[in-house]
Image (cartoon, rainbow, N blue to C red):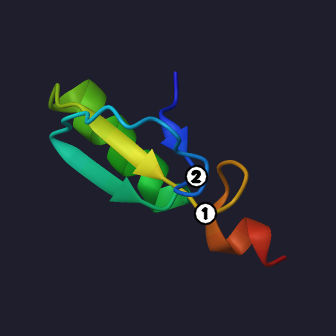
Amino acid sequence: MLDVVSPLAATSTEAKLYDALIIGAGFAGMYQLHSLRDRQGLSAHVLEAGDGVGGTWYWNR
């Protein structure tokens, strides 16, 4: 399950703690999420300004 959230869509006032915060859901961001969660066992959260994953290369095509 991907934990990708648009910063504008966040409505919860409940604070959540993560080991890492990843900015951008492009190729590098998705790899970083995979690496932190699956290989190192850390909790991570991805913020993306677009409506989903893809990153700059996808949204500016």
Say which quarter of the image contains residue 60: bottom right
Q: Residue at x 25, y 33 (%)?
A: 16
- What residue type is disc 1 on? Ala
Where is residue 29 shown, x and y percent of the image?
Answer: 44, 55
- Quick one: 61 or 8, which is closer to the camera? 8
Q: Residue at x 75, y 66 (%)?
A: 58
- What residue type is disc 2 on? Ser
Q: Is residue 33 left or right of residue 18?
A: right
Label 2 SS? loop
Measure how far apart labels 1 and 2 are at the Cα level.
5 Å
Label 1 SS? loop
Q: Residues within 10 Å of mark 2 (few under 14, many from 20)?
A: some
Q: Is residue 14 left or right of residue 30?
A: left
Q: Residues within 10 Å of mark 1 (few under 14, many from 20)?
A: some
Q: Residue at x 23, y 31 (%)?
A: 43
Q: Does 28 sit above or below residue 52?
A: below
Q: Residue furthest top?
A: 1
Q: Residue at x 36, y 41 (%)?
A: 45
Q: Does 24 sit above or below residue 39?
A: below
Q: Does 54 sit above or below residue 38?
A: below
Where is residue 51 shown, x and y percent of the image?
Answer: 73, 52
- Quick one: 33 or 13, which is closer to the camera? 13
Say which quarter of the image contains residue 26: bottom right
Number of numbered callouts drawn: 2
| Residue 6 - label | 2
Residue at the spot of label 1: 49
Q: Are marks 1 and 2 in contact (CB under 8 Å)?
A: yes
Q: Earlier in the sequence, mark 1 or mark 2?
A: 2
